[in-house]
Amino acid sequence: MSSPPLANLQNANKTKEELPLTEIIVITSGKGGVGKTTTSAALGTGLAQKGHKTVIIDFDVGLRNLDLIMGCERRVVYDFVNVINGEANLNQALIKDKRTDNLFILPASQTRDKDALTQEGVQRVLEELKKDFEYIVCDSPAGIEKGAFMAMYFADRAIIVTNPEVSSVRDSDRILGLLQSKTYRAENNQPPIQEHLLLTRYNPDRVDLGEMLSVEDVEDILAIKLLGVIPESKSVLKASNQGAPVILDDESDAGQAYDDATRRLLGEEVEQRFIEKAKQGIFKRMFGVR
Amino acid sequence: MNTSDTEIELEPCFKLKGSRVTITILELYEYEYATFNDQLAETVRSAPDFFQQTPVILSLERCKDTGFIDFIELGELCREYGLVPVAIRGGSEEQLLSANVAGLPHLPVGAAKPPEAPKKQPEPAPEAPPIQNTVITTPVRSGQQVYAKGGDLIIIAPVSPGAEVLADGNIHIYGPLRGRALAGVSGNKNARIFCYSLEAELLSIGGIFTVDEDLKTSNWKKNIQAYLDGDKLVISAFS
Ligand SMILES: Nc1ncnc2c1ncn2[C@@H]1O[C@H](COP(=O)(O)OP(=O)(O)OP(=O)(O)O)[C@@H](O)[C@H]1O
Ligand SMILES: [Mg+2]
């Protein structure tokens, strides 16, 4: 690649063809409450931290969660549905993140339902965002209804957030089937969506006790590439109470796990962690470090 | 074990050369485990010295069956008697697949033909009813259904719990079967189901079925075939 640095391109106000291709990433699961919004906030922030201009869109119309986790709920004036309906333009609705450069949030409406999302409307907004952003992260609602379809329809990649339990794995499997058939890429015979498994709320102790499925069990059933394992961690709740994505807490296990996952998403080789039980480390035993 | 760490240009340690070797061809007319076993044993008994790790090419050009052949089983059997299959020649699409799974490469028809092979008029292909087989190479997921109408269904991927695969003919799954599989759905009672790991929710052949509670009692997670013996659905494991 001999192209000039990105900053120059943007300053020169070049046409879209010369900008890096935008990637649309859907964070989806089927089952509710598995950690989609937590993941959208963390990975979106991670991508922006690494210098990629990123927008996170809340597709969970009617519930509105992302802005709380990002700590920008008081700055929401216009939302995604307003933009789709032409009641506001994108610049009015996009919220610039205060903590992380290159990061924007497009919040959901609390007062509408998911029928307010139309395929043409979503496509129009995505096309407009593509002119400006490298990554568009779509936080999908739970279920396999309209909202979830809208979030996945135009995706290039999908991150399947799964908890290590049978019902979550089953729903993820179901979503994988829909990604292969009910998306723009599938319907237009384009290369399939790239699928990644993100196993969240993983607790190796409970896996050992047989109360949870292991990483291998889940990989075996879903048969897709493992993006990472996010441990069950108190830091997630703490972060959401503070309205700051957990990836900013770089001391925490979950924060580090999301950072690893971001780097893998960007193509880096990063060894998997947080799969084994936290052992009394050999150094601790040898040197008596407490 | 690692002497090349020091970036010294070494003498090349191999070279690829073209060659012609004479190799025995085992021409298969049909395959059925017991008969093949008996006849092979008989042949070996008559010429024991000949069969000492002898490489053979399995020729399927004259094979009557065009359906699934378990080349893993066939290969083991051959090796027991001192024959080592190295490739197949000819054969149907489906046979190529199963040979591939057994690690046997495919030689195009005509390759490695003994030089004295007479140049005959090519025989017209035997009349066979057109068979429409379906090959699936991606996982069949929960909530999905695949139906192979008028032929066999060949799946080279897992079948998830909550998925359903159906065929008028046989069903071959080169992967775990965790969902429901229904072969011979238009009433073909000779249809069979093959899979690499039996973890199914339901198996059905020609409308006769068993569900997972019964399946779990034996052969669970084994490489199996299922077929009908009269009105009884039989499941047998490949060793
Ligand atoms: N790794 C984790 N460790 C501990 N708690 C977690 C973890 N990930 C998520 N949670 C908690 O699980 C709950 C659900 O998370 P989140 O809102 O991200 O899920 P969701 O999939 O977006 O839910 P919904 O389907 O309702 O949109 C939250 O209370 C969150 O704090
Ligand atoms: Mg959510």
Image (tube, rainbow, N blue to C red):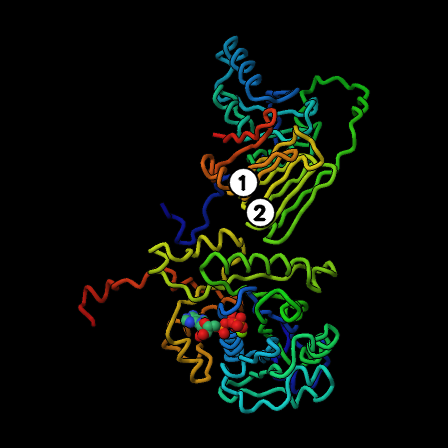
The amino acid sitting under disc 1 is Val
Disc 2 crowd, CA 10 A, few/some/many (<14, 14-19, 20+):
many
On the rendered image, what quadrant is the N terminus of chain B found in? top left
Spot the residue most to the top: B46
Q: Is residue A102 left or right of residue B30?
A: left
Residue A160 location (% of width, % of height): 54, 64
* Mark in the foreground, 2 or 1: 1
- Location of residue B160 in the rendering, given as x and y in whole percent from the top left corner: 56, 49
Measured along the vertical axis of the image, is residue A270 above or below residue B160?
A: below
Query: Which class describes the residues within 10 Å of circle 1: few (<14), some (14-19), or many (20+)?
Result: few
Q: Of the numbered discs in the image, which one, if any, rests on residue A24? A: none
The chain carrying label 1 is B
Q: Is B117 positioned to the left or the right of A55 in the image?
A: right
**Image x and y of residue A112, in percent:** 65, 81
Q: Are marks 2 and 1 on the same chain?
A: yes
Q: Of helix, strand and loop, which one carries label 1?
A: strand
Chain letter of the residue beneath label 2 in the structure image: B
Residue drawn 57% across the image and 16% down it: B35
What residue appears at the point 68 percent right and 58 percent down from the top-left corner? A181
Q: Looking at numbered disc 2 in the image, what kind of residue is underneath it?
A: Val
Judging depth in this view, the residue of A87 and A90 nearest the camera is A87
Q: Is residue B76 visible?
A: yes
Which is more N-terminal, label 1 or label 2? 2
Residue at the spot of label 2: B159
Q: Disc 2, disc 1: CB below 8 Å?
A: no
Question: In the rendered view, would you say A268 is above or below B164?
Answer: below
Q: CA distance from mark 2 to mark 1?
A: 16 Å
Residue under pointer 1:
B211
Q: Nearer the viewer, residue A85 or B204?
A: B204
Residue B84 placement (x, y as % from top left): 52, 25
Does residue A259 appear anywhere in the picture?
no
